[in-house]
Image: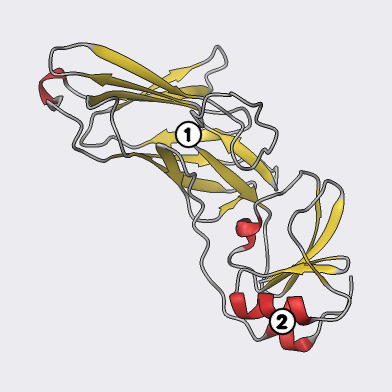
């Protein structure tokens, strides 16, 4: 690790809020590997003016200990595989409660144990069913797993991204050393870090610190992290 200038530590810490930018998003706060996490899925829109009637959230491999929360939308119903593992959670609105048009925001919450897989993205494919005033149903499948954390989206791929969380490694106050085994393009995952170092490159979400990095001799601004890279992060 390159010895960073002491002036780079005059920084402020900002809080990280991991929220997927999609029509169905998931908020978790910092999501840490091998920890139990509360996940709240937000459905901001219906389907072409129709109200949301049912939401099915599929649980990815490696995620266990799922315990959903009933909501005013409807009770949580789980589906399990032959081994008894929860594979999806579905909330369905009572038919009498379906609204004549798309006017409401809905939230669905579950608690889950995240896998010990830092610097990876967990996608939760979600099926949204809507019902129009005349009873016609339509479905949108939010199942695309090539979001901004994966820059290899083929041209023409439908933009129906699955909600996701990015799994962070455990940390302690001060310096933390990690080896990143995944390609990381979105450095906002370090939004609550004071500074990140990788060889002769550094990154900070704090604008003042970033300016200092840009002026630091023989130092580049870190814009991406490649697999196998050793990094140092100060929290």
Residue 40: quadrant of the picture: top left
Q: Is residue 75 above or below residue 114?
A: above
* Residue 15 locus on image (x, y percent): 51, 66
Sequence-wise, the earlier of marks 2 and 1 is: 1
Please say if 196 is above or below 18: below
Residue 212 marker: 2
Residue 54 seen in this snapshot:
yes
At a point 22% along the width and 32% down the height, the residue shown is 73
**Coloring basis for residues:** secondary structure
The image quarter in which residue 152 lies: top right
Alpha-carbon neighbours of circle 1 within 10 Å: few (<14), some, or many (≥20)? many
Disc 2 crowd rating (10 Å Cα; few below 14, some 14-19, many 20+) is some
> Residue at the spot x=52%, y=35% of the render?
65
Instruction: Give the SS element for disc 1.
Output: strand
Q: Secondary structure at mark 2?
A: helix
In which quarter of the view is residue 69 placed?
top left
Left or right of residue 220: residue 138: left
**For this rendering, which residue is in front, 108 or 148?**
148
Q: Nearer the viewer, residue 94 or 223?
A: 223
Name the residue at 70% across, 49% down.
Answer: 185
* 37 displayed left or right of 216: left
* Depicted 234 relative to depicted 104: above or below: below
Please provide percent x and percent y for residue 233.
74, 67
The label on residue 66 is: 1
Q: Quadrant of the C terminus?
A: bottom right
Quadrant the N terminus occupies: bottom right
Dots 2, 1 in contact, CB < 8 A:
no
The total of numbered circles placed on residues is: 2
């Amino acid at each position: 690790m390159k010895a960073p200038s002491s002036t780079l530590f005059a920084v402020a810490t900002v809080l990280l809020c991991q929220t997927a930018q999609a029509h169905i998003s998931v908020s978790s706060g910092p999501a840490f590997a091998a920890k139990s996490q509360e996940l709240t899925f937000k459905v901001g829109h219906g389907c072409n003016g129709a109200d949301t009637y049912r939401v099915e959230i599929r649980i990815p491999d490696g995620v266990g200990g799922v315990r959903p929360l009933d909501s005013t939308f409807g009770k949580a119903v789980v589906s399990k595989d032959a081994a008894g593992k929860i594979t999806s959670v579905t909330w369905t609105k009572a038919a009498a409660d379906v609204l004549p048009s798309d006017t409401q925001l809905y939230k669905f919450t579950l608690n889950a144990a995240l896998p010990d897989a830092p610097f990876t993205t967990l996608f939760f494919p979600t099926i949204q069913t809507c019902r129009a005033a005349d009873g016609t149903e339509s479905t949108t499948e939010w199942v695309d797993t090539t979001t901004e954390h994966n820059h290899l989206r083929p041209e023409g791929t439908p933009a129906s991204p699955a909600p996701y969380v990015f799994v962070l490694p455990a940390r302690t106050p001060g310096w933390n050393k990690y080896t990143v085994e995944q390609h990381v393009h979105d450095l906002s995952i370090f939004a609550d870090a004071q500074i990140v170092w990788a060889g002769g490159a550094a990154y900070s979400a704090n604008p003042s610190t970033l300016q200092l990095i840009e002026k630091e001799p023989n130092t580049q601004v870190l814009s991406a992290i490649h697999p196998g890279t050793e990094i140092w992060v100060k929290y």
